[in-house]
Image: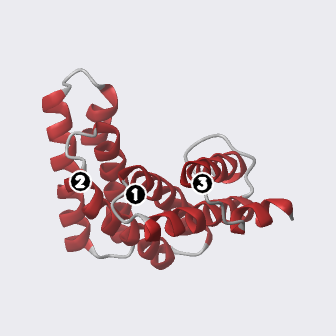
Amino acid sequence: CSSDLLAHDRSNDPALDLQRAKAYERVGDLQGHTMARSLGDSVGAEKSYQASLDILDRLAQAKPRDVAVMHEQIKVRYRLGTLLGDARGQSAAADCLRKGVQIADGALPAAPRDDALRKDAATLLQALSRVYTLMDRFEEAALVLDRAFTIYRDLLAHDPKNWDYRDGLAD
């Protein structure tokens, strides 16, 4: 398939590679995003998200402190993790989401005022908390959820009228 070739094609242009990774993310969303309207093709979505991660992981190896790349990795790991929870079980979802949390742990201190990054990191943490709850790992779920709420409280202090932040805190 030509899309598979594009995912593994190595460009000498990191900006172009980042755009390709974002394109694979969007394709995955259209195929099988679990939280939005999609075609319901979870197998295709998993492949697209993985193609995006392949590119992003390669970019991260070349520039480990690139916050834009880390932010995209967090977003794609959230999408893939929620998809895996439905398709392959909570253990696979937890593994994927934990890798996203590790990336967030490096990205957040590097960009402490990046509200979009912080919101996406909090969303990822909430997803991991839900997975831990489904796995009967309640203490871990509570700790992860507390981290998410701390981020949302800080975001609301900065922008108290933002309904996305309020919704995140209400979840």
Q: Are marks 3 and 2 in contact (CB under 8 Å)?
A: no
Distance (Cα) linking label 2 and label 1: 10 Å
Q: Are marks 2 and 1 in contact (CB under 8 Å)?
A: yes
Circle 1 SS class: helix
Distance (Cα) linking label 3 and label 1: 17 Å
Circle 2 SS class: helix
Distance (Cα) linking label 3 and label 2: 23 Å
Structure colour scheme: secondary structure
Q: Which residue is mark 1?
A: 70
Residue at (24% x, 63% y) in the render:
144
* Vertical placement of residue 155 versus 54, above or below: above
**Mark sitting earlier along the chain (3/1):** 3
Viewer-closest of 114 and 119: 114
Identify residue type, mark 1.
Answer: Met
Furthest-top residue in this view: 161
Q: Of circles 3 and 2, which is in front? A: 3
Q: Which residue is mark 2?
A: 110
* Vertical placement of residue 148 versus 144, above or below: above
**Mark sitting earlier along the chain (2/1):** 1
Q: Which residue is mark 3?
A: 13
